[in-house]
Image (tube, helix red, strand yellow):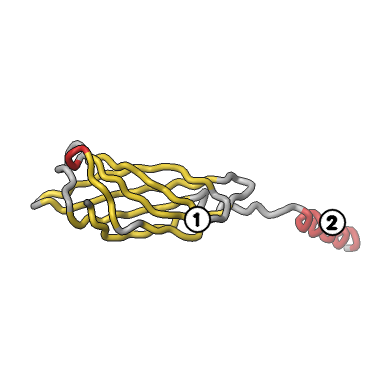
Amino acid sequence: MKRFKVMLVLAMLVLAAVPAFALAQVSAATINSTGSLSQRGFLVTVSGTATCASSEWGNWAEVFVEVKQPIGTNVARGGEWTEITCDGTVQNWTMTVHATSSSPLFKKGQASVLASVCDWDNCVQVERRIQLK
């Protein structure tokens, strides 16, 4: 019994000495209210911000963006992704999204943007209607 208690105390000391792994943590994301058209609607540039902290696992997160816009009975759509640096401060991101080959081109007007900012085990999603100019 005494040997069991000694082993239990030693195991607890070892566990207490091992640092817990803190994964990069995404804490916030935004999408700006306007986007710009180029290439006659084939390209849309959208932007926003994200905040995340670095960890032992890395100092980056991925930002995934999807843009959709109803065009008549169809939907113009496209998606893109990029990486941002995680250092606990607000990071700006900007992406140029291509209209998919199977969708119509984007036009001036309202569009929906879904942004997902993801670290190793967590995603923060934000959706916003923006004005394409």
Nearer to me, 77 or 93? 93
- Residue drawn at 51 percent across, 52 percent down: 121
Q: How far apart are marks 1 and 2 (CA)?
A: 43 Å
Residue occupied by mark 2: 10
- Is disc 1 surrounded by few (<14), some (14 to 19) or many (20+) residues within 10 Å? some
Q: Residue 114 carries which label?
A: none
At label 2, which amino acid type do we have?
Leu
Q: Indicate the secondary structure of the residue bearing disc 1.
A: strand
Q: In which quarter of the image is residue 104?
A: top left
Q: How crowded is mark 2: few (under 14 residues within 10 Å), some or many (20 or more)?
A: few
Residue type, label 1: Val
Going by the image, does 9 lie left or right of 119? right
- What's the residue at 45%, 46% (across, down)? 62
- Give residue 57's position: percent from left, percent from top: 60, 45
Q: Are marks 1 and 2 in contact (CB under 8 Å)?
A: no
Q: Is residue 100 visible?
A: no
Residue 7 drawn at (x, y percent): 84, 57
Left or right, 103 with reference to 47: left
- Residue, disc 1: 90
